[in-house]
Image: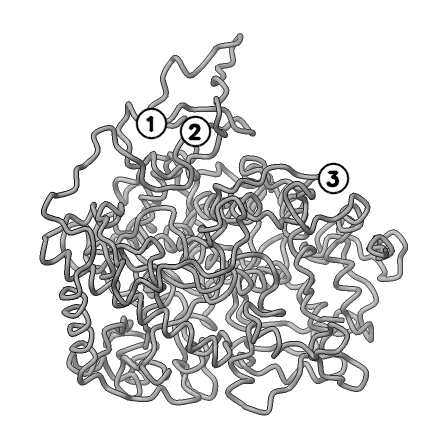
Amino acid sequence: MCRILCVSLLLWHFLLVCQFENSAAAAFSARQSRNDLEIDNQQTSAAPVSPAPTGATETSTVTSGLLKKCLPCTGVKCVPQIQCPAHVRMKSHEKPQICDLPAGKFGYCCQTGQNHTAPRLESRERRADFPSFVSPTLLDEARRNFEHLMHGVAQIPVHRGLPDFSHGIVFHSTAKEDLHNFGLSHNALEQVFTTQLFSKMEQLPVDDIITNNVPIKFTKTPLDQHCQAPPICRNIQSPGRIGGAAGQPLERMLPPAYEDGIWNPRVHSTDGTLLLGARKISRILLADVDRPHPKYNLLVMQFGQVLAHDVSQTSTVRLDGGDLVQCCSPGGKGPLNPQQTHFACMPISVDPDDEFYNAFGVRCLNLVRLSLVPNRDCQLSYGKQMSKVTHFLDVSPVYGSSQEAARDLRSLKGGRLRMLDDFGRDLLPLADDKKACASEEAGKSCFKSVIIGPQQMKRFRLVPLHQGYAHDYSPDVNPAITNEFSGAAYRMGHSSVDGKFHIRGEHGRIDEVINIPDVMFNPSRMRKREFYDNMLRTLYSQPIQQIDSSITQGLSRFLFRGDNPFGLDLAAINIQRGRDQGLHCYNDYLELMGAPKIKTFDQFPHEVGQKLARAYRTPDDIDLWVGGLLEKAVEGGIVGVTFAEIIADQFARFKHGDRYYYEYDADINPGAFTPNQLQEIRKTTMARLICDNADRLTLQGVPVAAFIRADFPGNQMIGCDDPSLPAVNLNAWRT
């Protein structure tokens, strides 16, 4: 049986049921207001999270007794403010009508959908002297500029065994996929450089670019072919819309925060000074403090890692030969000189007084910008990041996102996957090529799961049904991964990682303590006969770390260390990657949710405010990932409200934008399950999947609530053969 819990419909069912039921049970009495922020156990009252949206008028509400209720929406759905992003750019009189959501919250009657821009009442007229199409002359000049940037670039290899190399090969692709993605990225860069050149020539306002108000087409140029939609589609009502397909762009909740509106990353504060470096911010704000979660276990983190790699895999810009780009001099002694530096370099600087890296003379951590994908609108536009895999919960790390990858993963006998028979145990197959073995390891970069809380489950219509079919599919919903989700919110799980695995044997004793950096790209322990059962026991017994401003040094100093004395800083990478992806500051997402912005550091606890003031010039500079980690967990959840809303929005996209979602009937889903099959799927629990996939050598039982610590009061153990542990009856699929 596949050991990666590899049935996508069960993943979906699990994600929703376990999030809702577990988070509902997690409302700790010690929790204060969900609007609180927390760093180093200090508390502060932050901006209200879900106020009535601005722009409300008396005509949109009715009063019944002491209760003021909003009038129902007409012709559109009532959605949380974060799902109607155009409201941020609207004037007060343009704001949508407010409406009621579950749990006493407010939303908008949204006419603009997921678009983060909307037609203004006074539309801007296109300049008469603007051409309708990109001229061959302009494109040729952009290509010459591109070639000039590449002239003299150092062809310094990223040596195998270095942390940089391991970081660059986390996600495995076939040679054909790499070649295809390289071509897409190359053409996307030509589009971006052409846009930058035209913008400079015409002195275009940044606002025109980020709102796609430059309708100058690449039609009738060599780039035209990359504007055609490939023959893949899950949306039969809008065949030209291919959001969510492999090789397609990540979506955005807000327009990009590039300094030029096109691709140049944010490097300046709102006051014009340079932003502090990512490693410096990591050192100031993100210490290693042990704060085990009182309720949830490491299985939450590990399951989230599987989900993260399922829906989002990015790649970085590479050299023409496909090699990794090097931005630092040998040994990380400093950045390369400007003449040798690749245009996609975005290295992380290390200060001379760095208390860790100084001992090794490291002044530079390698980081390369993410690959782009051509703009399918076929017009001048900003850079759009590529996802190499499908954006859906379809277990693509197991089955592949292309026909070639699928063939590589299958035995081509009886519909089975390739497996290694390890003396009667099924393990993932060994690879002869060491590079393939390293890059195949898709489960070691510590992505985490999240529990968003019952209120968000209700507000975003994510609560699974107990019977019958769901009917809330919408062809207007783009199911693609958002930059905010992949670049910040879902990276919150890095804070939940414990730097050590306390491996528990058959009787619960700790047999071994494993440092996480020691086993990255090294799955050899899986060959030990009892280790698999013991690892599963560890996952449901050991607590995750609370999601807060603490990051284990296993990730902030020793990430992908290998045999080296130091590794990379994942916290710094997350901050730098957010700037690479054009994410807005934390304050802008508070506004998107309908909350007031934070105006001064004095709104934080004294110690926290002092740290933030050392790291940022103004609150409008705080990076989204950093700000999200500072928030107190929502009621019944383990993340703060900003991350909870971004993550809830993403899973709402998965559900409402995918006609193959497992709860939809045959009127929506051409492969719909029968009512009996659907009821069997609903029996599934994580406890049952653990039992079904364990070797059962030392593990004979599991906690009833598998995502909750085994020592949590009331979470009793249940035997794998206990008839009260439900199992799926596959007879429902017999014809």
Does residue 569 lie above or below 219 as drawn?
below
Does residue 494 lie above or below 663 as drawn?
below
Residue appearing at x 67%, y 42% in the figure: 464
Spatial CA span between label 1 and label 2: 9 Å
Badge 3 local density, few (<14 within 10 Å), some, or many (20+)?
few
The mark found on residue 108 in the picture is 2
Please indicate whether residue 57 sits to the left or right of residue 346 in the image.
right
Please indicate whether residue 650 sits to the left or right of residue 371 in the image.
right
Residue tagged by mark 1? Answer: 95
- Circles 1 and 2: CB atoms closer than 8 Å: yes
Whether residue 619 is visible, yes or no, is: no
Residue tagged by mark 3? Answer: 466
Spatial CA span between label 3 and label 1: 37 Å
For marks 3 and 2 on the same chain, the one whose residue lies earlier in the sequence: 2
Taking depth in this image into account, of 419 and 321 the one nearest to the observer is 321
Please indicate whether residue 693 sits to the left or right of residue 493 in the image.
right
Residue 444 position in % (x across, y down): 54, 73
Element on which disc 3 rests: loop
Residue 161 position in % (x across, y down): 44, 88
Amino acid at the residue labelled 2: Tyr
For marks 1 and 2 on the same chain, the one whose residue lies earlier in the sequence: 1
Taking depth in this image into account, of 620 and 248 the one nearest to the observer is 248
